[in-house]
Image: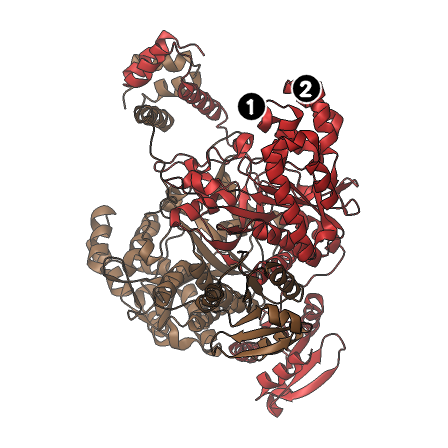
Chain colours: A brown, B red
Amino acid sequence: MALTWTKLSYLRQLGHSKILTRCVSTQFTDIPQIDEEVAKLLALKAKIQDAQPQKFVLKVPKGTRDYNPKQMAIREKVFKTVIECFKRHGAETIDTPVFELKDTLTGKYGEDSKLIYDLKDQGGEILSLRYDLTVPFARYLAMGKISNIKRYHIAKVYRRDNPAMTRGRYREFYQCDFDIAGQYDPMIPDAECIKIVYEILDNLKLGEFVVKVNHRRILDGMFEACGVPDDKFRTICSSVDKLDKTLWEDVRCEMINEKGLDPDIADKIGTFVKLRGGNELVTQLCEDENLKKSKAAMEGLTDMKLLLHYCELFNVSDKVSFDLSLARGLDYYTGVIYEAVLKGAELIPTKDGEQVGVGSVAGGGRYDGLVGMFDPKGKKVPCVGVSIGVERVFSIMEAKAAQEKVRTTEIDILVASAQKNLLEERMKLCSELWDGNIKAEMSYKKNPKMLNQLQHAEDSGIPFVVIIGEQELKDGVVKIRNTLTREETMAPRENINEELKRILSAL
Amino acid sequence: MALTWTKLSYLRQLGHSKILTRCVSTQFTDIPQIDEEVAKLLALKAKIQDAQPQKFVLKVPKGTRDYNPKQMAIREKVFKTVIECFKRHGAETIDTPVFELKDTLTGKYGEDSKLIYDLKDQGGEILSLRYDLTVPFARYLAMGKISNIKRYHIAKVYRRDNPAMTRGRYREFYQCDFDIAGQYDPMIPDAECIKIVYEILDNLKLGEFVVKVNHRRILDGMFEACGVPDDKFRTICSSVDKLDKTLWEDVRCEMINEKGLDPDIADKIGTFVKLRGGNELVTQLCEDENLKKSKAAMEGLTDMKLLLHYCELFNVSDKVSFDLSLARGLDYYTGVIYEAVLKGAELIPTKDGEQVGVGSVAGGGRYDGLVGMFDPKGKKVPCVGVSIGVERVFSIMEAKAAQEKVRTTEIDILVASAQKNLLEERMKLCSELWDGNIKAEMSYKKNPKMLNQLQHAEDSGIPFVVIIGEQELKDGVVKIRNTLTREETMAPRENINEELKRILSAL
C-alpha cells in the first residue's frame, strides 16, 4: 500500500517518528502494523455507518455451542470412561489457566499460529487463549522444574478454525490429554500411550478402529532417501499430513506445483507413503538400500521395532498399524507419532442427510524438545503423550442417543401429596430425605395436582413416589409408589429414610 | 482531544466521510472511536520502540494459577461435595461457551462492566469472556425458550479485578451455580437455595457460618421510608453493599460527601442497616410507621416472613439471619438476596504471617427480569439461584492440607521385579491387570532397583506391590507385598486378577 503525504503528516503529528523512520528506510513496503491500523480505521468507518440501532442477536459465538442436560449426560459418561482409564494407569491431574501469555504460545504451532485467539490489550499483559494442552503442560513443567510426571488434563482449548460442527469440529472444544514426562528407557511410555488409546476406544464401544503409528525420524529418513532437499522437509511433511483427507494424486500435485519438488522425488515418496503393516514392514524397510544410508531412518526403525514388540506384550497389536503416510502437522514432535481413526463403518448423519466419517479420534506423539524451549537453561524433559478427541466421540454418541431417552437427573424419590394444603408436610419430609443423603425433589407449587406429580415421576424416570395424604398423616404412615410397576405399599412415616434406603439399595 | 487539520486530511484520505460528517456536526467532541484509534497508534509506537529482543518471561498471567496434583485432589473433593448436593436436589447440568458475544454481557453488571475481559477483534464477532454464569444461563433460557429448569453449572469465570490470591481472589476462578427457573409459588425455590448453601457448607466442614438474607424490595422500601430520592436508590444501595468490608462511619461519609445524600437521611439508613434477626425483626419492621407506607417494603416483608418460615421447615433456621445491611452489588437482583459468610474463627494464614478471613463463600438471589432482557418479546422467566465461591473454599482447604500427605493417584498395585531382564514379564502382567480394570503401574526403566520400586510404593501410598522374580516365574507364582505391613504372601500367577481383587476389596 502506498503511503500518501497526508498519511505521513498525520503519523508525524502523532509522533510516530520510529514508524516513519522505518517507512522511509524501507520504502514503505514492510510495515504491516500500518496496514493493520488502516484496516482498523476502515472497520471503524463501517461500524459507524452501521450504527443504526441494531436488533439484538441471540446466539452463541460462531463455532461454539451450549450443552443441554442430555448432551451433558453423554459428555459425563465419556469423561468417566476416559478418566477411569487415565487413573487406572496411575496418572495425576493438573489444571492450567485458559489463557497464557501470548509469548508462551508463540513459535510452537507453525502455520496454525494464525488460528490462536488473542485477548484484547486492556492494559497489562498480552494474552492468548490456549490452543492445546501440550504447550501449557511444557510451560508448567519448565516453570515448576518438574522432570518426572504422569498426568492427565481434561480442559477446553480454542482454535479460530473453520467450524464443521456436525463432524464435531468446533472453535471451543475439549481435549483429554495423557502425557508421561521423564527420562526413561526407550519406547516403554510410548507403548503405554497406545495401550491407553486402545483401552479408551474399546471401552467407548465406537466400533472398529486402528491406531496408526509412525516416527518423525523415519519420515525424515524417508525424505532424505528420496532426495528431498533439507529445507523442504517440513513443508513436504505438511503435504504428507493431508493424505488422510486427500488423494495421493492431489498431494503429489501440491508437492510439485506449489512446493517445487522434483516429480521423480515426489513419486519416490509416493511409493513409500502407500506402505503400511507391522513387523514385516519394519524388516523390509531395514533392508531398503536407500533408507539404509539414512541414520535418522535406521534410528526410527529401531524404535519402531521395539514399539511394535511392546504392543504385542500389551496385547494391542491387532489394532496397531505402522503407516508411512502418517505425518501430523505440529512442529514439536520429535519421535513416535500416533493417530487413531474409526473404520469406515462408523458414519454419522449430518443435517442435510449426508453421512460423514469423523476420522481421527485420538492423536499424539513424542516431543522431547518442547520443555527445553521454556527452560531458561534449555534443560530438556523428554515427553510423550496422547490426546483423545472427545468432541468427535460426543458427536457419534449424540447421534446414537438421538432416539433414546437419557436420564438427566439422579432423583430417586418424588415427594408428592394427594390433597391440598400439604406443602409444609412435603417440605419437612423432603428436608429429612436430603439430610439423610437421599436424592429427592418435590413440586414447587403449593397445591400441585396428583396426576401432574405422577406424570413428572414417569417423564423423569424417578423410580419411587412417596405420597403424603391427610389419612396417612393421621395414621403416621406414607404411601410408596413404584413408578414402573405402579405398585403401592405403606411404610411408617417415622423410619422413612431407612425404609427408602432399603428399597433403593434393592433396585 | 482537538482534531488538527492534518488529522482531518488523513481521515478524508482514507475515506472516513461518515466520521468526518459527525466530527464536524458535533464539533469534534463525541467521537470516542477516534480517540481509541489514536490510543492504538500510540500504543503501536511504544511497541515498535520496545522491539528490542526481550527476555522470555516464564509465568502464568496475573491473577491466575496452575493447579498441581495435590491442589487438584483438594479441588475434586470440594466439587464432589458440591455436585452431590446439587444432584441430591435434582439438578440437571448444562455448559455454555467460555466466551459470549460482547453484546450479551453489555448492561448487566453496572459499574463492574469495566472488569470484563474482551477478546481481540481478529475479524468476525466481537467477544468477551464470561463474567459469571448467571447471564449466560439467562441467555441460554431465552435462546432455547426454556421456561422451567433446575440446573447446576460449574465452570470458570473471568474478572479483571485486583487479585488477592491468598484470600482466594483470582482473575480466573470457578463458580458453582445452582438455579431454579420457572413460575412457582412464592419462596419455595428461594428457601431451597438456602437449604443447599447450608448443606454444602455443613458438609465441607469449614466451621461456623451464617447465611444472611435480605430482599431488594425491603431495601427499596427502606430507602423510600428514609427519604432517599428515587434516582439515588441504586448508588446508595452500592454504598450499603460495602458494609461487609467497611465501617458504617466510612459508608456514611461516602453517602453524604460523594453521593450528596442529606446527613439526616443517611443517619436514618444507619439505624436500619444495623438491624439483624429473625421472625421478630420482620414483625418489628411490619409495625414501623415509615416502612408501613411503602408498598415495596410491605411486599418484601411478606416474602421474608414466608421465607423464614420455610427455613424452619427445612431445618436451617439456626444459621439464617435476616440482615438489613446485606445489599449485593449486581444490577439484576429483584427479590430475595443471600450471602453466606464464615464466622471469625476461620482465618487462613497468608505468606507474610498475617491471618485474614475469607469472608463470603456463597451468594445469590432472585432475578426475575434477566431472562426477559434476552427474549425478543421480553417474555420473563422468574429465576432464583446461588453461587458457591469455591476458590475461597480451596484456599481454606489448601491451608489446612499444607502439612498433610494427600494421595494424588489411585494406584492399587505396583508391578515390580526383583531381578534384571524382567521388563517384558512386568509389561505382560501390568497389561493383564489393566485389562481386568485394576489400577496398576510399573517403572518405565528396563532394570529398576528393587529398593527404588518399594520406595516409590511407600512414597505414593500404593497399598500393594506384586513382585516378579526368576524363581517365582518358574514356580508359576508372584509375591504380593503389603506396603504398610511389609507382609509378603505368594499367589498363583494364573489367577492373579481374582486374587488381587479379593485382597483389594478387603481393604
Nearest the eye: B89 or B202: B89
Labels 1 and 2 in the same subunit: yes
The C terminus of chain B - image quarter: bottom right
Look at the numbered disc 1 and give the secondary structure of its residue.
helix
Taking the image as drawn, is residue A97 in sight? no
Residue at 23% x, 46% y: name it: A258
Indicate the chain on which mark 2 is placed.
B
Chain ID for label 1?
Answer: B
Q: Position of residue A150 (x, y in %)?
A: 57, 62
Can you tell which quarter of the image residue A338 is in?
bottom left
**Residues under numbered marks 1 and 2 in contact, where contact means CB atoms less than 8 Å apart:** no
Quarter of the view holding residue B238: top right
Q: Quadrant of residue B123?
A: top left
Residue positioned most to the bottom = B475
Which disc is residue B22 wearing?
none
Q: Position of residue A209 (x, y in %)?
A: 36, 71
Side of B450 relative to A184 (left or right):
right
Q: Which structural element holds mark 2? A: helix
Q: Disc 2 marks which residue?
A: B256
**Is A464 or A31 nearer to us in this picture?**
A464
Query: Callout 2, which amino acid?
Result: Ile
Near mark 1 (Cα within 10 A), the count class, few <14, some 14-19 or many ≥20, is few
Residue B158 at x, y = what percent?
54, 41
Question: Where A486 sits versus A227, above or below?
Answer: below
User: Going from the N terminus, do you reach mark 1 or mark 2 first?
Assistant: 1
Q: Quadrant of the N terminus of chain B?
A: top left
Spatial CA distance of label 1 from label 2 is 15 Å
